[in-house]
Amino acid sequence: MKKKLLIFSLGLMGMTLQAQNTELKKWDANITGVSTAKDLYLQAPVCIDANGSTFTTGQFDHSITIGQTTLDPVANSAYLAKYLSDGTAAWAISMSGAATITSVATDENNNVYVAGIFTDVVVVGSTDGKTKEINGVPENLDKTASFVAAYNANGELLSVRSFMSEADADIAGSGLYSGQQVFNIEHIEASNGKVYISAIHNGDFTADNMKWEGKYLNIFDFMYDNLNSYGIFSLDAETLNNATSVAHIDVAEQLQSLQMGPESLNFTVENGNVYLCFVANGTINYETGAKSEKITLNYNGDNGMIEHAYIVSSIKGDAVNTKVFHAEAHQESAAYNHVGDMKVEGDNLYIGGTFLKSLAFDGTITHQGGSDLFVAALDKNTLDKEWAKACGINEGDGKYFSEKFNTMMLDNGNVNVYGYVLHDQKGKKEITAVQNLSFNNQGTSSLKETRLIGASDSKNGTTALRSINQETFETTISVTTTGNGIQDIPALTTQRMGNTFFFDKATDIQVYDLQGRMLKQDAKVTSISIEDLPQGIYILTNGTSSLKVQK
């Protein structure tokens, strides 16, 4: 694997970077990783760190080159790539084996965390060549296990951990059970030294001293099958250990005869406060670290009239605030009730997703066609509804057409939602329309963006959109920076004496030229000299901050 790290900063020469005029900068980067639609992961996530660098992910089934790095696949592998704020490809690594990255997050130190699902054996890449192998279920062709990996700003693997569930011993030995255990991580966030993780599972899940019990369906005393459960747990960011349950949702009764329970879950974290929203039907157990409660919703198994409620909670330590948003019961499929994303801005908690029939956050709003995209704004302190809006577009016959949620981004008081219309008929699925919409308390309008957007992120004036070309399967990461732009990258703090630069503590330091060639590298030093280099312009960097200097 060829690797070259290019660290580039447009700071002023000297010891600090000065503010520049407000401007708009934009760059694009293209990656074509797969050759068929079935191998394309539409919602492959993106993320922006505090320095304005962008991380993008995806699938690849043939050799790809990102910047100076060439990655080779094993089966349908996954990649993680970092681009600096000017669009330079800094590094890329692979998850070699049948793996999919489902979520990516950064922390206050610009470490990056990726989570996903995998099968059998996967080699987790690292820019320093110190890869690690993780093992799923041997000879299992389905991605039923999950992983979390932590990297520093230079793409060096810090730690990795895999997770699986297993069937209860009595259930497995009953002779009535032939189910398959699944543990799929769906979303992660990093905050204040913790990595928060949400997952769907069946079977028992154990991590460190934490255990979630699986629940099972009794089908006429003839067969046992799995019932899905959802949960959120945290790990210490530094070690990926010390698993601690934050919340867990499952059916209230073991071996019950009715198929009910949680349907969807998402969350976000702000200042140690975990905000979550889940959709459920029937009678469920909702457990947090502080308490356990039973929530009973309208469920009539005789006529099939089932309520699909949206339950919202805020959790901080032992303080738990929960509000149930009830919905009108109906006989239609539960598949269209989905919590796609959650964001916090100011005093508002925003929830985006899809719904069917009446909207739980506003019963006066009903879906059009097969299902509808929606956004609800709640007061984050009380969880009271501020406003709720739906797409309102009739995409076609509800038997065959439905709206799907991809991603959501906050934009100057508006909530931008990117989705599409799916046509599913006679075993053939196709995207027939792109739905990119802006929501606010006044209503809904179409965005100027017409591309199919699978993922997005926004931080400190930088926005990233990942689009997909349905014909060529090329993905494009488009990054726009407004405001003071590149000066938001922290300057490397140093004192200069002649051509020697001194640091206030031991630092790993590299020196690059403007072509991205690393000329010098020292570990844990308090000074570095460029006296031996020709006259020119150089970049000094420790991986998270940098300084442009001239000799």
Image: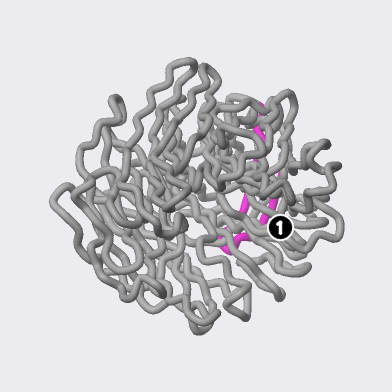
Which residue bears the numbered disc 1?
143
Q: Position of residue 98 (x, y in %)?
A: 74, 62
Q: Nearer the viewer, residue 338 or 487?
A: 338
- Image point 56% across, 36% down: which residue? 251
In this view, the residue farthest toward the left is: 442
Q: Please determine whether, in this image, residue 36 is positioned above or below residue 115.
A: below
Three-letter amino acid code at the position of disc 1: Lys
Q: Main secondary structure of the magenta part?
A: strand
- Image point 27% across, 43% down: which residue? 361
Q: Is residue 396 left or right of residue 64?
A: left
Say which element carries label 1: loop
Is residue 510 visible in the rendered image? The answer is: no
Q: Is residue 364 left or right of residue 454?
A: left
Q: Give the magenta part as a residue range.
A: 506-521
Q: Position of residue 389 (x, y in %)?
A: 22, 52
Q: Please determine whether, in this image, residue 214 is positioned above or below residue 80.
A: above
- Image point 58% across, 71% down: which residue? 40
Q: Position of residue 89 (x, y in %)?
A: 57, 61
Is residue 42 visible in the rendered image? The answer is: yes
Q: Quadrant of residue 17?
A: top left
Q: Is residue 74 left or right of residue 259?
A: right
